[in-house]
Amino acid sequence: MKGDAVLSESCWFVYILACADGSLYTGVTTDPQRRLREHNGDNRLGARYTRARRPVELLWHEQLEGRAEAQRREWQIKRMARKRKLELIAG
């Protein structure tokens, strides 16, 4: 079990979603596909922002070493202009 905890803590992702209203949402998670289901689900696990803008679509994600690194990258992306975010998504 201890090895599993190390794996989950070291494998984090930052992701960008496209919302139904055309806006972009950025977040962090250990599992992008699970998080997408949570954002689109009827439960209250999705972010308040995306609950009002469903359905959402996963446009981009990046794997990082740990939670702190993922949160730093999320902060960088959230400060980007929309045009720059779209360039990041396009590659």
Image (cartoon, rainbow, N blue to C red):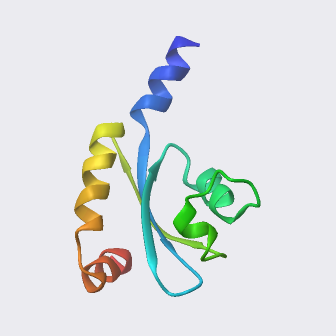
In this rendering, would 30 be left or right of 46? left
Residue sticking out furthest to the right: 42
Q: Nearer the viewer, residue 72 or 2?
A: 72
Percent coordinates x, y for residue 14 in the rendering? 40, 55
Q: Is residue 70 above or below residue 86?
A: above
Q: Which residue is drawn at 26% across and 57% down?
A: 75
Total numbered labels placed on residues in the image: 0
Q: Nearer the viewer, residue 91 or 41?
A: 41
Q: Residue at x 68, y 65 (%)?
A: 40
- Quarter assignment of residue 84: bottom left
Rendered-image quadrant of the C terminus: bottom left
Rendered-image quadrant of the N terminus: top right
Q: Which of 90 and 50 is in front in this view?
A: 50
Percent coordinates x, y for residue 35 in the rendering? 59, 53
Q: In this view, does 22 lie above or below 85?
A: below
Q: Residue at x 46, y 82 (%)?
A: 23
Percent coordinates x, y for residue 61 in the rendering? 43, 61
- Quarter assignment of residue 9: top left
Residue sticking out furthest to the top: 2
In this rendering, would 27 be left or right of 44? left
Q: Residue at x 56, y 47 (%)?
A: 31
In this rendering, would 27 be left or right of 65? right
Percent coordinates x, y for residue 79 in the rendering? 23, 68
